[in-house]
């Protein structure tokens, strides 16, 4: 029998609905695992056992009365600690916000609560979603469940680590330059950066207003789709929120991918950026799988990776500095070193450079729209390598870091990271699937089809599985 | 524009921006500044009048 912490949301939901699985039992199981293992993993900043158990009892009562709310009802989740939670500290993993207690929930926090999810706690992040893997903050950095000596990536580090380790069924991350997809890649899970405007940013600590996205992180793309069914709501309180018809997440789960046209942005990983041969081999193997599923695969050409990266970096640093300038100047000692240095760089970007970056952004958005006239999704790696050792990322501000993920923050496109296999060292490989704006359902359908056609979702981090077995 | 900046010239920029940097972090920040300069140069290119900022984007089908 599948252990409770190995159930996906899609597997647990029918059991919860049929009253064969108790939300109380499920939540208690997760809290027990968090207590046993999170001391090594540091995925959580704050665990909420009493609140979680109360919510689980409430959910159980509702389901027993026949008031079933949907597939997230009774599902234990975690929130990156930049999602506002009413009455619960929301720290941004920073000393500056250590005592920050919001007076209201983020819109997404509220939507997930209304759907009946159980909030297990708040999850680690890079400081203010920018600071990198830091050791000078009030809480330690999260570690990678596949190997505790390795980095889980960021900034949604705890969100990725918690899912991979089986400490939550779903989590929320945010993504300004790859902060959902990077941790999803290095932690071997599924993470969706939705189309800009599809998921509300209201009540999420901002980093870069025009590049920030909130989105789900789960063991499977199918589970991400179940979360998106709840999260994709127009929010009049978010000026960037799009008032569009919700993508057909439920309907898309029933369809296959036969006949879809896949464009491979090969120059990104063959010539624009140095990429680990194992990552490239994983992509090639995935393309074979997609051909077997009936997809047509062709190479496509975009502007060089650096064109997207330059514009995205100038915009994100400018907007981050605009938000943080006052507190950074007044109380620099309350920021960690990495966050302070990274945010400070925004001080050197002139207004004309910012505007020119926005003009370049317009050109690149048009370019990618043009490419999408001949293909349905794009594929390239999420990250150029597997997870490095914890602390090896360093600052890296002074080195050029071509990013496969920033491209799609700039264009606002929906972009999903999935696990595309494992390295010889046993660390997850990765692949990114990108779609047209507001075709998030199609992107998730492609990710789900790949996961079901391969066996990578059957493999959990071994050391955690062994420890769990020992504990049970 | 010069691809490098002296420590002294960079210090002037820091002072003007009101930014304090620890001596041990100066070289990293100076190097990062030069990377930023290169980005600025690459983004600056000839454009027509109609190359307006992408304040919003109009996705297909919207």
Image (cartoon, helix red, strand yellow):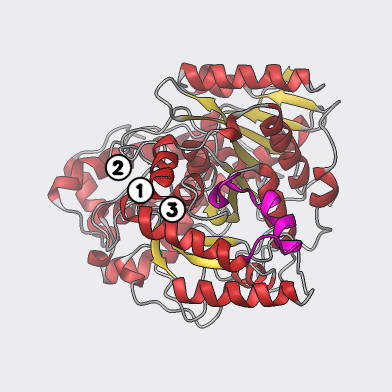
Note whether A412 is above or below A229 in the view shown: above
10 Å crowding of disc 3: few (<14), some (14-19), many (20+) = many
Q: Are marks 1 and 3 on the same chain?
A: yes
Q: Are marks 2 and 1 on the same chain?
A: yes
Q: Estimate the spatial distance between the alpha carbons at disc 1 and disc 3, rounded to whole Å.
A: 13 Å
| Part of the protein shown in magenta | A1-22
The answer to whether B56 appears left or right of A26 in the picture is right
Q: Residue A316's spot in the image, x, y percent?
A: 49, 51
Which residue extends farthest left? B23
Q: Estimate the spatial distance between the alpha carbons at disc 3 and disc 2, rounded to whole Å.
A: 19 Å
**Tag 2–tag 1 contact (CB < 8 Å):** yes
Q: Quadrant of residue A230?
A: bottom right
Question: From this viewpoint, is residue A422 visible?
Answer: yes
Q: Residue A23's spot in the image, x, y percent?
A: 62, 66
Q: Estimate the spatial distance between the alpha carbons at disc 2 and disc 1, rounded to whole Å.
A: 7 Å
Quadrant that contains the N terminus of chain A: top right
Question: From this viewpoint, is residue A228 visible?
Answer: no
Sequence-first disc among 2 and 1: 1
Membership of A430 in magenta stretch:
no
Q: Residue A449's spot in the image, x, y percent?
A: 74, 33
Residue denoted by label 2: A395
Q: Are marks 3 and 2 on the same chain?
A: yes
Q: Nearer the viewer, residue A416 or A146?
A: A146
Q: Chain of mark 3?
A: A
- SS assignment at label 1: loop
Callout in the foreground (2, 1): 1
10 Å crowding of disc 1: few (<14), some (14-19), many (20+) = many
Which label number is shown at residue A158? 3
**Tag 1–tag 3 contact (CB < 8 Å):** no
Residue denoted by label 1: A132
């Amino acid at each position: 029998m599948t252990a409770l912490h190995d159930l996906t949301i899609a597997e647990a939901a029918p059991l919860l609905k049929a009253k064969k699985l108790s939300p109380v039992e499920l939540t208690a199981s997760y809290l027990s695992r968090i207590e046993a293992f999170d001391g090594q993993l540091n995925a959580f900043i704050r665990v909420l056992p009493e609140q979680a158990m109360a919510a689980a009892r409430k959910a159980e009562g509702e389901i027993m009365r026949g008031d079933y709310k949907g597939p997230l009802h009774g599902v234990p989740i975690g929130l990156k600690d930049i999602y506002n939670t009413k009455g619960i500290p929301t720290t941004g993993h920073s000393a500056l916000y250590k005592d920050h207690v919001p007076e209201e929930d983020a819109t997404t926090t509220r939507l997930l609560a209304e759907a009946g999810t159980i909030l297990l706690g708040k999850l680690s992040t890079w400081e203010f979603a920018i600071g990198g893997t830091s050791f000078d903050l009030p809480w330690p950095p999260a570690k990678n469940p596949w190997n505790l000596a390795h980095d889980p990536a960021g900034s949604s580090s705890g969100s990725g680590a918690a899912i991979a380790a089986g400490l939550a069924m779903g989590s929320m991350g945010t993504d300004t330059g790859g902060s959902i997809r990077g941790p999803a890649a290095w932690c071997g899970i599924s993470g969706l950066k939705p189309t800009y405007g599809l998921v509300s940013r209201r009540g999420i600590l901002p980093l870069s207003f025009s590049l920030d996205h909130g989105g789900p992180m789960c063991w499977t793309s199918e589970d991400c789709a179940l979360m998106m069914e709840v999260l994709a709501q127009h929010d009049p309180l978010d000026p960037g929120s799009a008032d569009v018809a919700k993508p057909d997440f439920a309907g898309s789960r029933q369809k296959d991918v036969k006949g879809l046209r896949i464009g491979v942005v090969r120059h990104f990983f063959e010539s624009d950026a140095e990429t680990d041969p194992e990552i490239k081999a994983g992509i090639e193997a995935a393309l074979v799988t997609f051909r077997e599923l009936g997809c047509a695969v062709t190479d496509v050409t975009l502007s060089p990776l650096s064109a997207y990266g330059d514009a995205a970096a100038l915009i994100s640093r400018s907007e981050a500095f605009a938000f943080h300038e006052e507190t950074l100047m007044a109380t620099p000692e309350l920021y960690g070193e990495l966050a302070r240095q990274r945010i400070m760089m925004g001080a050197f970007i002139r207004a004309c450079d910012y505007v020119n970056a926005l003009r370049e952004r317009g050109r690149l958005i048009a370019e990618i729209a043009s490419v999408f006239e001949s293909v349905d999704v794009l594929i390239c790696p999420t990250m150029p390598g597997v997870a490095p050792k914890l602390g090896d990322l360093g600052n890296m501000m002074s080195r050029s870091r071509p990013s496969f993920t920033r491209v799609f923050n700039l264009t606002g496109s929906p972009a999903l990271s999935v696990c595309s296999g494992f390295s010889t060292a046993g660390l997850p490989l990765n692949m990114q699937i990108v779609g047209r704006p507001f075709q998030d359902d199609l992107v998730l359908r492609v990710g789900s089809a790949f996961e079901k056609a391969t066996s990578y979702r059957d493999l959990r981090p071994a050391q955690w599985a062994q420890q769990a077995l020992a504990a049970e | 524009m010069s691809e490098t900046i002296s420590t002294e010239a960079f210090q002037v920029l820091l002072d003007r921006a009101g930014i304090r940097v620890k001596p041990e972090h100066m070289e990293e920040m100076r190097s990062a500044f030069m990377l930023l300069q290169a980005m600025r140069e690459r983004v600056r290119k000839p454009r027509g009048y109609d190359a307006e900022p992408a304040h919003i984007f109009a996705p297909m089908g919207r």
